[in-house]
Image (tube, rainbow, N blue to C red):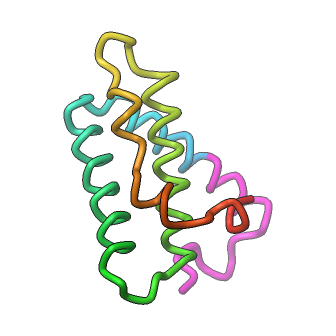
Amino acid sequence: MDVLGKDISHENRQKLTLENASLAVQFLAVMPTKLLHEYVMQLQSLLTISIISGAMLNMELFVETIRVMDVLHWINAKLKDPESQIEKKEFHNDAVNNNLELKSHMV
């Protein structure tokens, strides 16, 4: 599904994507830490359930979720006040680290 439409040039798509990314980072940076933490915990739960359920893992979706977690970790470390940051341990997921080899799937 092409939500940007067929008439948008490649150059404009890149610009739009960068603008959206910048907006998303700004939005997440000003999000109250409590809400950001809840979001991180929900993503962690989804990752863990995906692994322990034994169902076929959608690796593309799984890797993209890990990338979102990386962005959230970066925002937390770089853009949040040190006294209100989410603890680093909250970004660690034993189910992921102990059960999957993700390096071959990451760029």
Q: Classify residue 52 by image quadrant.
A: bottom left
Q: Classify residue 31 by image quadrant.
A: top left
10 or 97, nearer to the observer: 97
Residue 70 sits above or below residue 64 on the image = above
Query: Which residue extends farthest front?
Result: 98
Q: Is residue 5 magenta?
A: yes
Q: Is residue 17 magenta?
A: yes
Q: Classify residue 14 by image quadrant.
A: bottom right
Residue 81 sits above or below residue 25 on the image = above
Total of numbered circles in the picture? 0
x then y, percent, for residue 12: 72, 59
Residue 3 sits above or below residue 24 on the image = below
Query: Which residue extends farthest right?
Result: 11
99 or 63, nearer to the observer: 99
x then y, percent, for residue 75: 47, 32
Residue 36 sits above or below residue 102 on the image = above
Q: Is residue 16 left or right of residue 31?
A: right
x then y, percent, for residue 46: 31, 65
Going 29% across and 17% down the picture, which residue do you hit? 84
x then y, percent, for residue 18: 64, 48
Quadrant showing the C terminus: bottom right
23 or 63, nearer to the observer: 63
Going 63% across and 55% down the picture, which residue do you hit? 16
Residues shaded magenta: 1-18
Going 41% across and 30% down the picture, which residue do you hit? 88
Q: Is residue 5 left or right of residue 52?
A: right
Q: Is residue 2 left or right of residue 103?
A: left
Quadrant showing the N terminus: bottom right
